[in-house]
Amino acid sequence: MFKKITLPYIMFVTGPYLITQFIGNINNFNVIYLLTGGGPFGVKGLSDGAGGTSLLVTWLYTMTGNSNYKLASTLGILTFLVSSIVSLITYRHSSATKNEEDFQ
């Protein structure tokens, strides 16, 4: 009963929510920047102002502060493209688009 009734309806509702949370976690700027500022800096193997706790968004912010606009904008656009393609493909293959009329 769980596999045939409950689980499909759970995945119908949580599929789009999980996609939204995945994209939201990429843009989690406020937590990292307000708590640690992206530091500690000077970690071996990290380049162009990246700190030990930097996410992609805080690293892009640091690069724009260092006037490296070309690389920061290129990485921002590539991040948008990859995340949008992954989310569109995942949403297209989820049950939320296939069985929409069954959920009513």
Image (tube, helix red, strand yellow):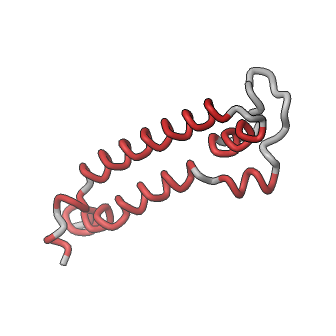
Vertical side of 23 occupied by 65: above or below: above
Q: Quadrant of the C terminus?
A: bottom left
Give how far across and how far down residue 76 sits, in percent: 55, 40
In this view of the protein, which residue sits in the foreground, 25 or 66?
A: 66
Give how far across and how far down residue 45 sits, in percent: 74, 21
Residue drawn where x is 14% and y is 71% of the image: 101
Residue drawn where x is 21% and y is 68% of the image: 5
Residue at the outermost bottom position: 104
In this view of the protein, which residue sits in the foreground, 71 or 95?
A: 71
Residue drawn where x is 24% and y is 49% of the image: 93
Give how far across and how far down residue 40 sits, in percent: 85, 37
In this view of the protein, which residue sits in the foreground, 10 or 56?
A: 56
User: Quadrant of the rendered structure where residue 103 is?
Assistant: bottom left
User: Quadrant of the rendered structure where residue 12 is?
Assistant: bottom left
Residue at the outermost top position: 45
- The tally of labels here is 0
Residue drawn where x is 58% and y is 37% of the image: 73
In this view of the protein, which residue sits in the foreground, 32 or 82?
A: 82
Q: Quadrant of the N terminus?
A: bottom left
Vertical side of 29 occupied by 9: above or below: below
Give how far across and how far down residue 28 sits, in percent: 63, 53
Vertical side of 93 occupied by 43: above or below: above
Left or right: where 81 falls relative to 29 = left
